[in-house]
Image: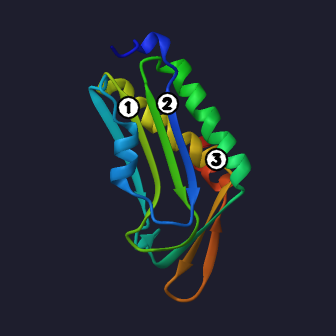
Amino acid sequence: MLPTLDTVAAKTDFKITFAPLSLADAYGTADHASNGAVVVMSGTVRNQTEGRTVAFLEYQAYEPMALKVFEKIAQEIEQQWTAVNTVVIHHRTGKLAIGEISVLVAIGCPHRHEAFEACQYAIDTLKHQAPIWKKEHWQDGASTWVSIAACEQLKSGF
């Protein structure tokens, strides 16, 4: 017999890696017999930003602190959406080509509404708080670091 969700803390899986991310692995890790929903958010490298052609992206992370932020996100999800039973956060570092997956967040939960909300909370919070930096390399050879401060300006409307 499976334990009830009331007695089991959310299962977590966090990863920061140079290796390509697997949608199937993230989904499989988030899946659970008590789920009615697994919501997966896959962030991919797009070919344009603000009308400029992107050649590739480069990600760097301060891994020990980023993993602590992932853990904090999972704890906050567990407090706010108590039915969530799995939280998966995987992020790439290094050089990523157009179309590659840069981040995966997967939430397993008995109900879809909570799974969607928790997934959105996880990706939004990660983008604002995790020490992971993105450098956009443009087709013309120029490059720009995208800072957490820029993300905060968008959030606050400045």
Image coordinates for residue 115, horizontal then vertical, percent = 37, 30
Q: Is residue 68 left or right of residue 91?
A: right
Please name whichever residue, 118 or 5, is drawn nearer the observer in this view of the structure: 5
Query: Is the residue under label 2 in contact with that under label 3 (CB below 8 Å)?
Result: no
Q: Is residue 139 above or below residue 88?
A: below
Q: Amino acid at mark 3?
A: Glu
Please rate how many residues cluster around mark 1, counting C-alpha atoms within 10 Å: few if below 14, some from 14 to 19, many from 20. Answer: many
Instruction: Name which of mark 1 and mark 3 comes first in the sequence.
Output: 1
Viewer-side label of 3, 2: 2
- On residue 152, which mark appears? 3
Marks 1 and 3 sit apart, C-alpha to C-alpha, by 28 Å
Query: Is the residue under label 1 in contact with that under label 2 (CB below 8 Å)?
Result: yes
- On residue 39, which mark appears? none
Q: Residue at x 51, y 45 (%)?
A: 89
Marks 2 and 1 sit apart, C-alpha to C-alpha, by 9 Å
Q: Residue at x 42, y 15 (%)?
A: 5
